[in-house]
Amino acid sequence: MALVTLGCDKNTVDSERMMAALVGHGARVSSEVDDAEVVIVNTCGFIQSAKEQSIETILDACALKDEGSLRAVVAVGCLVQRHGDELRREIPEVDLFMGLTELPSLVPELRSRGLLPAEDDFVPTMERPLRILSTETRHTSYLKISEGCDHTCAFCAIPLMRGLHRSQPVEELVREAAGLGAAVVKEINIVSQDTTWYGRDRRRHDRSAPLLPDLLRALLQGTDVPWYRLFYMYPSGMTRELVDLIAAEDRILPYLDMPIQHG
C-alpha cells in the first residue's frame, strides 16, 4: 500500500498512526505509488489550493487504477470529512471514502474488501507501534496533543472538519513521547489546532484537569527527549505560568509559533 500525505503536520501524525495500524495488520506500506496495489490519499481541505492538490492526487491515483496499475484507491481525511457526499458523487472511481470520524474503521473496511489479510490469516510477529515515523528528518517528530478547536472563527474551517477541542490524556502523550525518544528523536514539535487550549475542555468537567504547563512538566519528567518546541499557540491562551515555565526550562525551546490570523 502507498500512503500519500497532504496538508499539515497533524495529517502527518494521522498518517503515521495509519501506517502503524496497517503494518500491524499485515500490510506493506510506503510513500511510493509506483509499486503499490492500493493507494490511500490522506487529504487536506483547509484552503482552496490544498483542496485542489488533494483532488488532483486522487484523480492521478484513479488514472493508475484505470490503467490496471492499482487495485483500489482510498481517500481519507479532512477533505472527505468536509465534502464527502460531493466527492462520492463526482469521483465514483474511488473505492472507499473515509472522513476523520470514520478512520478508526479503516482496517476492518479494508479487510472486508479483501485489501488486507483476513484476521484469522495474519498473526502479528511484533508489538504494534503507536506510529511509524515518516518525516525526512528522523531526529525530529511531532506530538499531537489535542484534536479540534473551540474557536469558531469566521475565516477558519477547522471546527467543521476536526470538530471541537478534545485534549489527549497526559499519560498517553508521555508514553507516545517516550516512544519517540526511544526511536532516537531529539526534538519533539508539539502541535494541535490550538496548543494553548490544552486541557481547558476537560476543565469544564474537572477543575483539577491538567493544562498545558502541567503537560509540559510531565513530558520533561517522564521522557529523556532533549528538546520540545511549541507550535500553534493561540495568543489569548498565553499565561504567566506558561511563559515562566518556558523561560525556566532549557529543554523547552524559546520559540513560539503564534499566528495572528491563519486560514
Image (cartoon, helix red, strand yellow):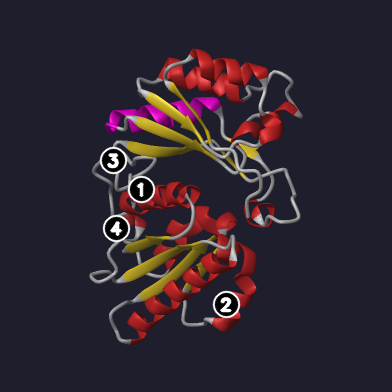
Magenta stretch holds residue 230: no
Q: Nearer the viewer, mark 4 or mark 3?
A: 3
Question: Which of 93/237 is in front?
Answer: 237
125 up-or-down from 247: above or below: below
The span from disc 4 to disc 1 (Cα, nearest Å) is 9 Å
Residue tagged by mark 3?
138
Which residue is drawn at the image coordinates 59% and 63% (left, top)?
Answer: 47
- In the rendered structure, which disc, 4 or 2, sits on the residue that comes first in sequence? 4
Dot 1 falls on a residue whose secondary structure is helix
**Magenta residue check for 174:** yes
Callout count: 4
Q: Are marks 2 and 1 in contact (CB under 8 Å)?
A: no
**Can you say which quadrant of the picture contains the C terminus?**
bottom right
Q: Which is more N-terminal, label 1 or label 2?
A: 1
Image: magenta residue range: 170-184
Q: Position of residue 67 (x, y in %)?
A: 31, 86
The residue pinned by badge 2 equals: 88
Identified at 43% across, 27% down, the residue is 228
Q: What residue type is disc 1 on?
A: Ala
Q: Earlier in the sequence, mark 1 or mark 3?
A: 1
Residue 29, numbered circle: 4
Give whichever of discs 4 and 3 has the lower sequence position.
4
Q: Amino acid at mark 3?
A: Arg
Q: Which residue is mark 1?
A: 20
Give how far apart the Cα atoms at labels 1 and 3 are. Answer: 16 Å
Query: Left or right: 249 with respect to 147?
Result: left
